[in-house]
Amino acid sequence: MSFSSTASAADEQELIKRGEARYNKLCALCHEVGTGTYIKGRQLHPDFIAAIVRNGLLAMPAFPHTHLSDEDLLAVGKYIQQSSAPEEK
């Protein structure tokens, strides 16, 4: 499964905003509190993220299409890929 896209810069920014909203709703519950691996700031490729989300890995459950559409998964992947690592405290 490949999520390559030829979207304009405005479309790309809208996709990333959509991804941020989905990430905050579905992913942050584990990945922002230490339950799951912290994934922002690692520039993970959207295809890698999609493979893990669809198939699961270790404690990460698989999320079927009925729970997260391919379009939303692409958006989440793009958001994670461009996200910065947290600042050190």
Image: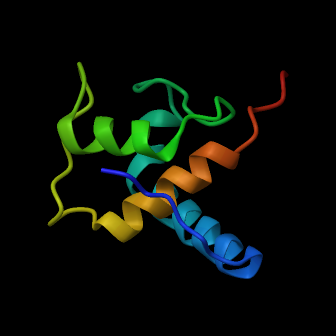
* Percent x, y of residue 49: 41, 40
Report the residue at 22% width, 33% height from top: 56
Above or below, 53 against 35 in this view is below
Q: Quadrant of residue 32?
A: top right
Q: Quadrant of residue 44?
A: top right
Looking at the image, which is closer to me, 36 or 8? 8
Q: Can you say which quadrant of the picture contains the C terminus?
A: top right
Residue at x-position 38% and y-position 70%: 71
Looking at the image, residue 34 sits to the left or right of residue 67; the answer is right
Task: Name the residue rendered at 51%, 31% in the picture.
Answer: 33
In x, y percent, where is residue 23?
A: 49, 55
* Figure check: 28 above or below 20: above
Q: Quadrant of residue 30?
A: top left
Closer to the camera in the image, 20 or 1: 1
Q: Is residue 15 above or below residue 54?
A: below
In this rendering, would 69 be left or right of 27? left
Residue nearest the viewer, comparing 71 with 62: 71
Q: What residue is at 31 percent from the left and 64 percent from the top?
A: 70
- Number of marks in the image? 0
Q: Whole-percent x and y of residue 55? A: 19, 37
Q: How is the image coloured?
A: rainbow
